[in-house]
Amino acid sequence: MNLSPLQPKIDASTIAPDRLANNPKLTEKQKIAEASRQFEAILLKQVLESSQKTVIKSKLTPESTSSSIYHDMVTTQLADSISKSGKFGLSQTFEHQLDHPHGHRPDGLTHPTLSAGWKTAGHLKPLHKPTEHKASATSSNLVSE
């Protein structure tokens, strides 16, 4: 009986973003999923940082460099935790778009809007015809001084 050694399971979240694409131990699907999750974490961090800018400053809280660094670390960890929970849902959208580009669905069909792209944009008709307003320069429209 010949058994192959067990391959250790790699946690993609521990791999740095710049080394993610060239990692031979991860599948393309794992790379896309982790890149999407990390991008979601970056966006969440920016949202959290901007939401904290509106907090009224207090004389009781210190405004030092170390406090700023600690605050940044807490925000980064919070954004990463929210992203890893999968509850926000933005990374799944990114992952689907990257995994199925140009509107292709897993069942082989294409989404009509996404696959058509910009080509159909000029062929769309408005729901209503816009009315044209022409300004006429009649004597009643002119004001004399």
Image (cartoon, grey):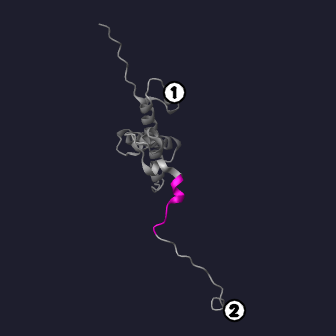
Instruction: Look at label 1 and name its amino acid.
Output: Asn
Q: Is residue 85 above or below residue 132?
A: above
Q: Is residue 131 above or below residue 110?
A: below
Quadrant for the N terminus in the image: top left
**Res. 22 mark:** 1
Residue 104 as seen in the image, left or right of residue 145? left
Which is more N-terminal, label 1 or label 2? 1
- In-front residue for pair 27/145: 27
Q: Secondary structure at mark 2?
A: loop
- Horizontal and vertical percent for residue 8? 37, 20
Can you identify the residue that label 2 sits on?
Answer: 144
Asked if disc 2 and disc 1 are in contact, CB closer than 8 Å, the reply is: no
Report the number of numbered marks: 2
Q: Secondary structure at mark 1?
A: loop
- Horizontal and vertical percent for residue 130? 52, 72
For the residue carrying disc 2, how many other residues have a C-alpha within 10 Å: few (<14), some (14-19), or many (20+)?
few
Tell me if residue 61 can be seen: no
- In-front residue for pair 11/78: 11
Instruction: Look at label 2 and name its amino acid.
Output: Ser
Quadrant for the C terminus in the image: bottom right
Asked if the magenta segment contains residue 126, the reply would be: yes
Tell me if residue 112 can be seen: yes
- In-front residue for pair 130/16: 130
In the picture as drawn, the residue positioned furthest to the right comes out as 145
Please report the bounds of the magenta region as a residue range: 119-127
For the residue carrying disc 1, how many other residues have a C-alpha within 10 Å: few (<14), some (14-19), or many (20+)?
few
- In-front residue for pair 56/116: 116
Asked if the magenta segment contains residue 47, the reply would be: no
Residue 32 as seen in the image, left or right of residue 122? left
- Horizontal and vertical percent for residue 12? 42, 30
